[in-house]
Amino acid sequence: MERRGLDFVVLNQGNANLTDLYRTHIGDWPKFYKMDTLSKAGFVATELLLKNVGERRCDSEEFIRSRAIVLFGSTASLCADRNYQETIQDKDNYYPSPALFVYTLPNIVTGEIAIRNHWRGETSFYVLEEPDASQMAFHLACAFQDADTESILAGWVDSRMNDDFQVFVTLISREDAADTGWLAGQLQLMINNLNK
Amino acid sequence: MARLIRCIADNVVSPLGTTSRSNYDSVKAGRSGLARYESMGNITTPFVLSRVDRAVIDGLCAELGIQGNYTFFEKFLLCSSVQALRDAGIDASSERVLFIISTTKGNVSLLGQSQEGVDQERVLLAKAAREVMRFFGNPGKPIVVCNACISGVCAQIEAMRALRSGRYDYAVVIGADEQSPFIISGFLSFKAISDEPCRPFDKDRKGLNLGECAATVVLEASDGKKSGWELVCGAIRNDANHISGPSRTGEGSYLCLMEVLKECHRGELAFVNVHGTATAYNDEMESIALYRAGLIDVPVTGLKGYYGHTMGAAGIMESILSMYAVRDNTVLATRGYREQGTTYPVSVSSETRECNGSEFIKLLSGFGGSNAALLYRFVE
Amino acid sequence: MEELILKLKQEIIEVLNLEDVKPEDIDNDAPLFGEGLGLDSIDALELIVLMEKNYGIKLQDPAKGKEIFKSINVMADFIQKNRTR
């Protein structure tokens, strides 16, 4: 019997407006408006995925400790870096912004998702040269070496400029990651959709 | 049985020395790299920083045969890794060798000022990592761990896992950050930087100092027990509380400690090397996590008073110095500490102490609610 | 003073990205932090930047912000007395 493919959500600036999606499908998390584009993209895609798969918020200690977040990207926080750099570049207009500075770390998007969902498992952000299905599958499989981790919210998220983004997210179980070749195939499908 | 992971070579380049040994000796002698700066670039607020002399790095590059159009950050990574790999005596160009870079901001200073002969794309972390791997002729795909201040511990955990998977025989874990006006101005805007040398865990602590360091560990996977430093286990956990403020309950750090304690022989635990940034919230949070994990009586030591917060290098350099300290039966003095300044009285001291035991825990926490810990054990 | 209060509210909404909040939603005497607007420690730091950038007031000690950011009225009053631009 053929194995059922992974559910995933893919969004990019060509086919999605993050603020519209937030207003239509989420709406109860005003912190969204404070996020940088990278975090907005990761946050909205995750919310939509959890809705699609019908996962309810679960606060059992066992569950929240078993859910990890592992995201990959190539630009990391470049967009936020540029925004922050603008606040310090000019001597006569030098007002470093703490609200922009905090997003100059790409793992903040993993933190935003963890806070929203109360997940206390591992959170990691890895920077790669490009979306590479086999490289990502390998490192995701490695993450399950942590015996407490039972599932991973995984994906790719990039943003070079404000309102420019490519993101996909999926949910991976321990069993899914055991077959690294199959997992890489699934990730490749998502990567193929990144720019569509 | 899981493959055993051993540290076979290490290096630290900092204002206190260009080898691990010279760094350890400097710290034990009480020397600090911290110095006060009145300004830098557009920054006009005074701050204390541990900064590497650029001429020392250039001299080291010449000595080690590192030539080419490299940024300071890339030179820094190379100065440390070339020395560690020379000591390891392995073929770094093999596909069985994994490179993992740990940094928070890499070449971000290129955004403020471009550099002749350096492609602007090297502001992308994996592109900078590629330059380092190219130097060694390594054919692999670059991977950079970018988990804020816990990156150095995460990079070692990821290396351990990759080695256990069987795909690699060696992992080269290199961490560094350049303290440009970008990072300094940001932490100043957070009102997190002290204009005096920092005072970890002290009641008068006023904030952190930033610092520059590059550090490398070379890890080897083996199927049988061998003498040396074994990386036993590690864990990464999130507070799920706030993106910049540490958890009031120390939840993530507590969970990390409980995880590594599963593998720890308590009688062999020499000390916990903490994050100890000397901000009000971080040190308080760590004291709560240590208390909750039942570690209140275990000696605690922090190195920020010697190095400042070295960001991407912190988890690696602080692990290496801990290895030297355990072998020397020493709990290094926590420079800057005077009087208890946390709710729970952790066992921290301004004096060097003697210790027994063959294991230590390295603990870190950072922005994004992230926390990480790992356990090293010396095997006779 | 009325004018300053309205301007201040608009600036706060913009700087802190309070997208769904209108100036009239902010009570002049209600605490800015705690309940209501859902502001956090980063917002407090950003208000310190706002005071410097728009009114030339430098606050070195973030703890002092706690008193000044008690309410819009308190904040406007402080700005009125200390502004340099």
Image: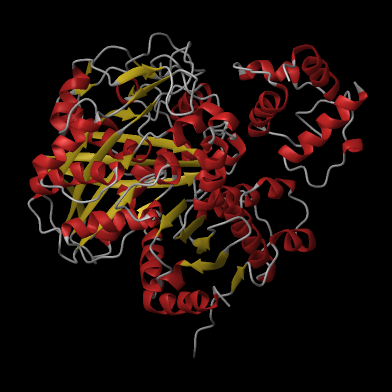
In which quarter of the view is residue C41 placed? top right
Of residues C73 and B215, the one drawn nearer to the viewer in this rendering: C73
Single out the residue that lies furthest toward the bottom.
A1
Q: Position of residue B13 (x, y in %)?
A: 21, 34
Image: A140 above or below A121 = below
Image: C64 above or below B174 = above
Image: C72 above or below A97 = above
Image: B246 above or below A49 = above
What's the residue at 53%, 80% (across, down)? Answer: A5
Please indicate whether residue B272 sits to the left or right of residue B331 in the image: right
Number of marks in the rendered image: 0
What's the residue at 34%, 58% (across, down)? Answer: B127
Q: Tell me, yes or no, if residue B178 can be seen here.
A: yes
Of residues B57 and B370, the one drawn nearer to the viewer in this rendering: B57
Q: Position of residue B12 (x, y in %)?
A: 21, 35
Q: Position of residue B70 (x, y in %)?
A: 26, 48
What's the residue at 69%, 50% (across, down)? Answer: A32
Q: Tell me, yes or no, if residue C37 can be seen here.
A: no
Please indicate whether residue B128 sits to the left or right of residue A12 in the image: left
